[in-house]
Amino acid sequence: MKLSAPLYEALLKYVEDGTMPYHMPGHKEGRIIPRKYIENLAKIDLTEVPGTDNLHDPQGPILEAEKLAAKAFGAKMSFFLVNGTTCGIYAAMSAVLNDGDAVLIQRNSHKSVYNGLILTGATPVYLNPLMDYEDGIAMGVSIDELEGLLKDNKDIKAVLITNPNYYGFCIDIKRIVDLVHKYNKILIVDEAHGAHFAFSDRLPLPASKAGADIVVESIHKTLPAFTQSSILHVNTDRVDADRLKFYLSLYQSTSPSYILMTSIDLARDFMEREGKDRLDKCVNLSIDARNKLNAIEGVKCIGDDVVGKYGINDYDTTKLPISIKGLGISGSEAERILRENFNIQMEMSDLYNILAIMTVADDEKEFDKLVKSIEGLLKYKKNQEIRLIEYYPDVPEMKMKPSEAVKKPYTLLKIDDAVDSVSLDYVIPYPPGVPLVCPGEIIKKDMVQYIKLLYNIGIKIVGIDNLNIRVFK
């Protein structure tokens, strides 16, 4: 009988096509994963039997592996996550926040942070990102504005910051840590894209070493581990470890994958043995690639030019955010051309940019292929201007908490008819990935006009379908 497994077949086709990945996971199709591990993958897919320990009550090899991870990452204690960084964000927020507590978050936080608001019943206080309209990216934050919010909202219990952002740009995390602790608040850092920082002094300062209370990292994004492999670090006594463990158990599967847990353990071991040298090479190759990319007419690899602006203090050299708006084509169009005509797949694209993630699994061949492929985009150059609207509406009034809004009865309205209604959805245009409206917020006329403008020029907007939106009935 012929095989009928559409997902497996689709994945196998991607591999057999020989597409070169410039995207996560960091092992890049298993290039540096130990062969013995791959050969025994099905055999070590075990459960909690004598000798294998229990993630929800580790006392043996899992506990030992977590202690080794804490030492390697510079944390007080570390916990393996098999449900991705998302479950770590949920557990961190739940361990620190109660229903009604105020939490300061960036307006452009990951969806898991917003979902954490729904799970905890916390009330958000928003810190707007500083916009780099030239490159179409929501960058860092104003530390002065952060301090102002802490002064004006004395009931804030915790601060949740994302660092680095998707593109690899970093705020001054040490100043943030010191400021948040000055006001005696707990700092949670979503460091999903910075797990490799701990293994090289040529990369930005990791939040754990800066003294953040809780740090959550995606091991799979930049290190040689399987997707969903993440880790949570605790660094101070401000965190109730027992309460945190309770929520980690609540948000993680009761059948945790030993394949994922060993993936984290092996990634840590690899990075301790080879990480520094591998990252040195990756950084050097990335710098060389940046210089070559910047020499291509109409192309810019964003980096040094934004440090000292938009709240940016540093950047991850191994991330290559490539602006191609000078070629008169959009990032999404460039991503499609690169896949169809050059057989390479980027991590993501937005209106202006394409993003390549380079890791310890990449070598000269991968960097050379990337540069030559980007050079090949020159023949697709168009005589047109790609331009993002340099405007963003103010954060709307919050009528009810997100946790309350999502439980309300709703009706579906055309966006024009939704003015002054309470949204039950997130409306998020990409770029820049900053919510225009969140559940529980009032939809205003200027926002509707802006949404229609973005929609009509082809900007992707999550949360509306054919200009329809769910609102409080």
Image (cartoon, rainbow, N blue to C red):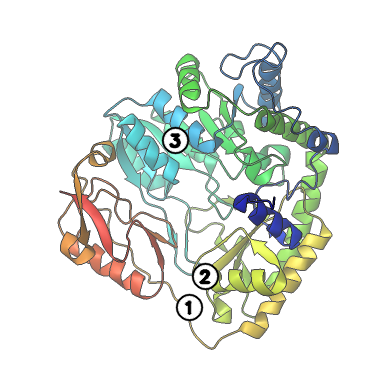
Q: Are marks 1 and 2 in contact (CB under 8 Å)?
A: yes
The amino acid at mark 2 is Tyr
What residue is at 19 percent from the left and 64 percent from the top? 445
Query: Badge 3 is on which residue?
Result: 179
Q: Which mark is residue 398?
A: none
Amino acid at pointer 1: Ile
Q: Position of residue 219 (x, y in %)?
A: 64, 38
Residue that appears at 44% across and 50% down: 141
Which residue is the extreme one toward the bottom?
383
For image coordinates 59% across by 38% down, the residue present is: 228
Q: Which mark is residue 386?
A: 1
Q: In which quarter of the image is residue 82?
A: top right
- Label 1, label 2: how many angstroms apart (C-alpha)? 7 Å
Q: Which mark lies nearer to you, 1 or 3?
A: 1
| Label 1, label 3: how far apart the Cα atoms are | 39 Å
Who comes first in sequence, dot 1 or dot 2?
2
Identify the residue position indicated by label 2 in the image: 352
Would residue 272 appear left or right of 105 to someone viewing this image? right
**N-terminal label among 1 and 3:** 3
